[in-house]
Amino acid sequence: MPTMPVVHLLTVDSTSNYAAQLLKQSSAPATPAPPFLVWSEQQTGGRGRRGHEWISPVGNLYLTMVLPAQADAPTKQGLLPLKAGVIIARLLQQYFGLRLTLKWPNDLLFGGRKLGGLLLETSSNGTQFGELLIGLGLNLNHTPDIKGGDYLPTSLSEILGKDIAVNELVQLFARDFLACWQALPTSSVPEAFAEFGVGPDELCFQDSPDISSNAGDDANIGRRWGRLGVLRDDGSQMMQVLEQDESIALSHADHGWRWSFQSKEPMPLAVADIGNTAVKIAWYDDALNPTPDRVLVHAHQESDDTLRQALTTLKQHSSCPYPTLHIVSVRPEQTKLLTRLAQECGWSAVTVRKRPVRRHCKLHSSGYLLKDLGIDRLAAIEAWLSTLTSEQRQLQDHYGIVVAAGTATTIDAVGVDGRHFGGLILPGLTLAMQSLHQVASLLPEIAAEQALTAEIAGQGLGHDTRTAMMCAAVEMTLGALNQTRTRLRDDMHLQELPHGICMTGGWGERLAPLIDANYQPNLVLNGARVLVLGGWQHPT
């Protein structure tokens, strides 16, 4: 596939305006024929949707790709902006290993913050559509200060911790975009959009024009709330308006609805981790803050009334009239129970989709095998990746190990760029000791939670049957962990990130000191938060 010609400008009012002028003088000898790309280092009159100005300082990306008239434009025009968004998201994932979130119809988000936007334009004469102009604004090296804006912005340099070469990215788009556009049938766009899009049942709101004057201290005055519905085959987005209990179809960009976690004001978030033995629920007063404000733990054997009361109490902390509980789970029957109880208490329950945020996507590299990786492991990995500093993310030959020491113990080796090098799953400490008693009844049954002290765990060898069993369970886990480190060092020639071992789970607190690991009791919960937001961001 040939590279699109690039028209490079130092400054212009708008790349889309300039591209449209080029099309009007198409007979001029120096004018390229579509497809071509117009790139300017700066814009003085950049345009976003709803007539908003697109702030365009030097260092960010401003371009317009001009494609020939699309044969399916008369019947599929609502899908074309979504198609462009999917391709941009796929290319940025390929180039940088990041999965963006697409908010219908044309916002590019990461971690609940706006990274960029698309603006599609075309000329038409009845049913005859002309060339397609795909305008793209992407924050690369500067996070714009948006006066009076209603969302938080971000930039690729802020996310990745390094500067991005604008001209190199332009050349990549010129090389790859057209081939990706032609390879994606427009009829397949709704399914492809779901890979990146804000999902059904997510909460959105729309402010009235005069909300700033009548809201006072309550931002909910004058605000309409809704939940996303399905994306229809024509590209329109269904929305359930909660106050009026009606469904509407959003069919154009001038609608004013925005995802609740795209808001500039702090938005609360509740996530639940359903494990093998308990339900943990975390409440964040501000979804962008990685530290939960409240954590509730409910063992599966406890009564439903206890969990119902906990949900009722937690809901009282919410300033949002329609709180949503986002669930990650390895227990389908417990998911149904929690969903039912949540709805009885006035919550909406949403199952978090199993999608990676930081994914290594280079050709012939493994990345995550999502069909084989449980949602709890994925959440723990994403939570660990979210804690890395900008400096750590540049150490491309370094890795960390994420250990969840619960009913089972999982060990996952992960590169700082998101590569999943593989892992191990072995019996947890309690299960290991119980299995010995079950197959050899002369061996004692040990209540490990009470018997295994930090002193016994650290002594290495047992001096009687009971301590020998306990020490063996500990050494089995530590041995598997050390064998993983040896393979990564000797076979893969990788270096361990300083303090790069992270532990969670019920046994993690006792095991962490033995291996100089960082113990994070709420790791999976924070990973669920990262997956809900579609990326990590620290509060401003």
Image (tube, rainbow, N blue to C red):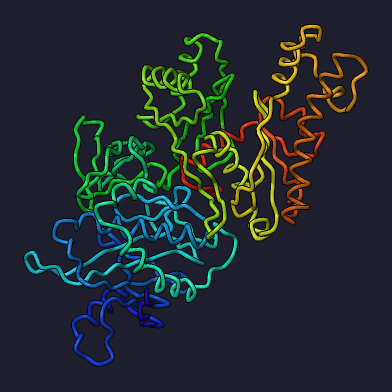
User: Residue 388 location, x and y as percent?
Assistant: 64, 50
Most extreme residue toward the front is 439
Q: Is residue 392 toward the left or the right of residue 333 in the image? A: right
User: Residue 527 location, x and y as percent?
Assistant: 55, 39
Question: Compared with residue 219, is residue 7 higher up or lower down, i.e. above or below?
Answer: below
Seen from the viewer's position, the closer of residues 308 and 13 is 308
Q: What residue sits 36% from the left and 81% below the top?
A: 5
Q: What residue sits 83% from the left and 25% below the top?
A: 457
Most extreme residue toward the bottom is 29
Q: Is residue 83 toward the left or the right of residue 399 in the image? A: left
User: Residue 532 location, x and y as percent?
Assistant: 46, 40
Q: What residue sits 55% from the left and 54% below the top?
A: 360
Q: In which quarter of the image is residue 64?
A: bottom left
Q: Is residue 124 toward the left or the right of residue 293 in the image? A: left
Seen from the viewer's position, the closer of residues 482 and 438 is 438
User: Residue 401 location, x and y as percent?
Assistant: 69, 43
Quadrant containing the N terminus in the rendered view: bottom left
Question: Compared with residue 110, is residue 95 higher up or lower down, i.e. above or below?
Answer: below
Most extreme residue toward the right is 463
Q: What residue sits 26% from the left and 82% below the top?
A: 33
Seen from the viewer's position, the closer of residues 504 and 332 is 332
Question: Compared with residue 423, is residue 78 higher up or lower down, i.e. above or below?
Answer: below
